[in-house]
Amino acid sequence: MKRRTTLKMTAALALSSMFGGAALAGSHSADPIVIGAVAPKTGPLAGGAAVTHWPNIRLWAEQVNARGGLNVDGTMRMVEIIEYDDQTNPGETIKAVQRLATQDEADFIIAPFATGLNIAAAPIFARYGYPQISVSNITDQVEDLASKFPNMFFTLGSTSAFASDVVRILSEMRDAGQLTGNRIAMVNVADAFGIELAAAARPLFKEAGFEIVYDTSYPLGTQDLSPVVKAAKDAAPNAFVAWSYPPDTFGLTEQAIIEDLQVEAYYTAVATCFPAFGARFGAQAEGILGAGGVNPDSEAFKEYAAAHEAATGAKPDYWASATTYASLQILEQAIEAVGLDREAVSAHLKEATFTTVLGDISFNENNFNEAFWTVGQWQDGVFRGVAETGREGASSVRVKSGWGS
Amino acid sequence: MDIFLTGLLLGGTYALIAMGLNLQYGVARIMNLANGEMLVAGGFCAFWFYTAGQVSPFLTVAIVAPLAFAANWLIYQVMLRPLVKRAKTRGQLESDSILATFGLSFVAVGLMLAVFGGDYFNYSYLSRPVTFAGENYGLNRVAAFCGAVVICGLLYLWLNQSRAGLSMRAIATAPASARLVGISVGHLAAIAFALGGAVTATGGALISTFLTLDASTGVMFTLKALIIVIMGGVGDVRGTIVAALLLGVVETLVASLIDPGLTLAAAYTLFILILLFRPQGLFGRRQT
């Protein structure tokens, strides 16, 4: 029996280190709390996960263990993280969650990365009774999902809120005379996220009295976006809106600079908030609007950003990084409140209010966090939130004035 | 005119991506599915040198190319030579090398992940407009296009003028007969494979000035390279150049005149048409 356990442990260790190097935090007094993590380390979404997802898990585990662990029913217990790479493949995500539930016997599993992978894994989380506090999971099917999977939680927002706040910001800019016309050029990446957002935004723009003068999509992974930007420029828009993903967010902006796209508002979606975006475009990023945002002046965020940089050597992004960290704070507070019983933790998540780096977070009847950041803008080298649905510290929006290099 | 030039620039990028694979597949007979990873590694070196010491990616090439040459030569000697030796037919070597390099691509992704991390690496280099005939083009794209012209030109001259180059072409055309006239096929195949790797890594360094790469984007480039090499005709430099430019122009035409959403469809339609009407590729010779 003993030998079998040892064998099993060795095998598990070997496996977990093979599949992405397990971060083992040793504890000697009490058994550690085993927390599973599944997200891309390879594949198309690995770049995003490397910025937003993995560093926060490492930071959180390090901080908890430095404090001596989590207080479970009066005993301090360390956390042990088991990491798996799902290769950005939903099938692998499901397999890894199953392995964590059945073989690693994880006490809790951190929600996967990205909308598609979270939705793919929802049934398996539900089957084994794990709460799924999802972050990078933006959809308009929250109600439907929450009724099917009662232990699935949503922290980062909904598609319609992101689309409607962009429309709202642009309307306000027009009313303030910052936009001198109502011509919008809108493009989107032909992927679930981009298609859903463009579909949500189209009627909203029309309703708000905007005229969409250019509307197109391009395939994920397009190498050359110059035809897109050239055509958008020819349409002479007042504002350019791109529902874009990481590689094309960079590509579109580079082309916009080269084409000298003159607009009064320029918006690209995912990854605009990445520190790498600001580092690459420098002063040219000034005034660019993007999805997400934070209040970079809040003490909680400053402290978090400093700890993030110290622990991982990289700055957090100005959006989902802090929310990812907040989701772990929520899990931590729920465990300390009710222990390791997963049903009790899920029930507690629905009722309690949690204190996080973003401020207080609670979930409504659809397990949805209603207060989140929607639009941010690069201002003086920092990406500041300019629109939110109930967060404090939004800055006022500025006009994009050229690409001054 | 504007569309045509934009297409040519894109075609230049594609030529950089595909030229190395053409050498590896056409001459060394290795269908290298880890080709894209070599490209990303070249791009990463350029990124690293640029961010660490502001070294121009166009100078980095002087370091990247020999390094990649050596690395690919080693890969060939250690990993692929046994496959070549035991292969009884060309078909067997092809399937063996596809499997082996498919595995190699995972190893390469894992290594790059461990060394570079999974983050996007991108930087801004020569990201300035140049105006030509009233239209703006990215200087970095123009520079990479010039790089492609130089590399392809040198390769073409070398393959057609030098003795080693002619031997390479002899192997590409008829490996069995090449042996009869005293060409050391094994030795030259290793050099062709290494050279292919060096060209790919150089391409990666140039491309990284305007594309955003991360450790796992390699496969995207492998696929593009594969299409181009097969369209152009295996083992022919001219074929790869023409196919790359054609693909670039067609994609840009479709994106500008019809819809950017159809670029992929256009690329694959072109691919199917060429396979239907010239299965050996534009410049390929019919197998007898």
Image: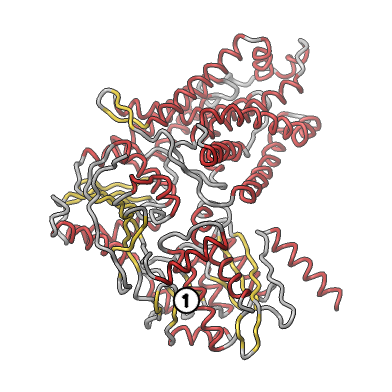
In terms of depth relative to the viewer, which is nearer, A7 or A28? A28
What chain does mark 1 sit on? A
- Would you name the residue on which mark 1 appears? A152
Q: Nearer the viewer, residue B135 or A347?
A: B135
Q: Position of residue B178 (x, y in %)?
A: 73, 14
Relative to A1, does residue A120 appear above or below in the rendering?
Answer: above
For the residue pair B279 and A223, the one nearer the viewer reads as A223
| Residue A110 picture quarter | bottom right
Residue kind at label 1, given as amino acid type: Met
Tell me, yes or no, if residue A271 can be seen here.
Answer: yes
**Looking at the image, which residue is at 56% across and 41% down?**
B48
* Above-or-below relation of A8 to A174: below
Q: Position of residue B45 (x, y in %)?
A: 58, 38
Residue B195 percent coordinates (x, y)? 64, 25
As drawn, is B171 to the left or to the right of A52?
right
* Residue at 38% from the left image edge and 46% from the top image edge: A282
**Disc 1: CA contacts within 10 A as few (<14), some (14-19) or many (>=20):** many
